[in-house]
Amino acid sequence: MNSAEFFNVRPVAQALESLLAHWRPTPPLESLDPREALGRALAQDVHAPEDLPAFPRSTVDGYALRAADSFGASPALPALLRVAGELRMGEAAQHSLTSGSALLIHTGGMLPAGADAVIMLERTQALGDDVELLAPVAPGENVLQPGEDVAAAALLLKAGQTLRAQEIGGLLAAGVTEVTVHARPRVAILSSGDELVPPEATPAPGQIRDINAHTLAALVSEAGGEPLHCGIARDEFDDYVDRARRGHAAADLLVLTAGSSVSARDLTRAVIDRLGAPGVLQHGLAVRPGKPTLLAVCAGKAVIGLPGNPVSALLVARQILLPLLRHWFGASPAPAACVRALLGANLSSASGREDSVPVRLRERDGHLLAEPVFGKSGLIFTLVGADGLVHVPLDSGGLRAGTSVDVQLF
């Protein structure tokens, strides 16, 4: 069977399902301080070692008191309590609060024994050693109870959760100073093509700078992986397969860019066939851009062959590589950050494929518009000038201007 005969497109979801059925990674585990684990995915559930908060705390500046002492209070008939002192931050009251008295307290301060509420400072009036209450408070008002945020032994975070700033803060607040995370996947990235030179080089006539390796590396880093640069392979089989084998051996996933189509100079499928069984699982996706993408598993490692077109490579990597990295971390597919907008122009599409169209967001007459950023294939600045993507569904034939669409934000 030649390459052209093997080139049968499938929707992205089906192609991914086939790949994931053959790729079952077992990533190593690491123990880290949460402060060193930003962007890492938890390998195990985390439970709270203690109540949070650990003691009853005031949520306002005011006076700690017995709620019953405030019942019936109003501006016309205030209740009068004796101020027994002030609770300083970081200190606990030395004595229980008795009926008819109050203690000045600050936001976050620990309630004294005997108090069951806090009245806001704005609803009081100081009178020497006393305080007038101008409104009643209910038991528990303006108070965080022990365990109200998280109870001891409660599930804090589930395995697969990616740690953001708020998760790290929550873990530390609960006293969790060590978590088990998946090791970062090493993603080898190999570009190919006689026309490519490194970005720092000055291209000669007919040459272009290799940007795919670096845009893909940035995407991998952003998703929590560790990119490994494998250089540029020439359009010569032995050089290409040698570099691919070294990248495959050094990494957990291998990404090849360019040479994935079916012309005589496109060597990527033949190279992948030398990396181990089962080899190529899918050649061709029902998408534009990115149709000639290759998906494979070779000797237990996922291998992706992306088009050389920088726009195609980056957009397909978002649809294929990012889900693979989440699979490595044991995480479910993440919902894309989207906004709803009205399409600013007609978008045509051929039957049997899904189109990804860069759009720029603009507000006009109180409506958010998604204006397509049209450009010829391969122009990276069509993405630089865009805020997100609109996906034209499979077999829809296109979308009309004015249609309400989801814009997947970059």
Image (spheres, rainbow, N blue to C red):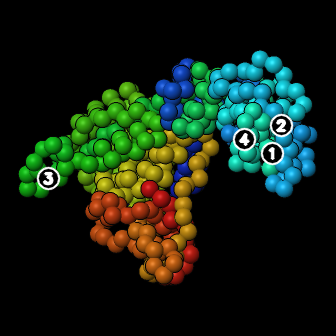
- Counting labels gives 4
Residue found at the far top of this picture: 94
Tell me whether the residue at label 1 lies in contact with that at label 2, contact meaning CB atoms closer than 8 angstroms. Answer: yes
Q: Who's the residue at 26% across and 48% down the image?
A: 211
Q: N-terminal of the two: label 1 or label 2?
A: 2
| Disc 2 target residue | 81
Residue found at the far front of this picture: 128
Q: Residue 218 is drawn in which quadrant?
A: top left
The spot of residue 319 in percent (x, y) is 49, 53
Give the distance between the C-alpha atoms of the residues marked 1 and 2, in whole angstroms. 8 Å
| Direction from residue 156 to residue 23 in the image, left or right | left
Q: Residue 384 is drawn in which quadrant?
A: bottom left
Tell me whether the residue at label 3 lies in contact with that at label 2, contact meaning CB atoms closer than 8 angstroms. Answer: no
Label placed on residue 126: 4
Q: Residues within 10 Å of mark 4 (few under 14, many from 20)?
A: few
Q: N-terminal of the two: label 3 or label 1?
A: 1
| Disc 3 target residue | 207
Q: N-terminal of the two: label 3 or label 2?
A: 2
Please state which of residues 348 and 386 is positioned toward the viewer in this rendering: 386
* Secondary structure beneath label 4: strand
Tell me which amino acid carries mark 3: Gln
Tell me whether the residue at label 4 lies in contact with that at label 2, contact meaning CB atoms closer than 8 angstroms. Answer: no
* Secondary structure beneath label 3: loop
Tell me which amino acid carries mark 2: Leu
| Disc 1 target residue | 133
Q: Who's the residue at 57% across and 42% down the image?
A: 20
Q: Is residue 19 visible?
A: yes
Give the distance between the C-alpha atoms of the residues marked 1 and 4, in whole angstroms. 9 Å
Tell me which amino acid carries mark 4: Ala
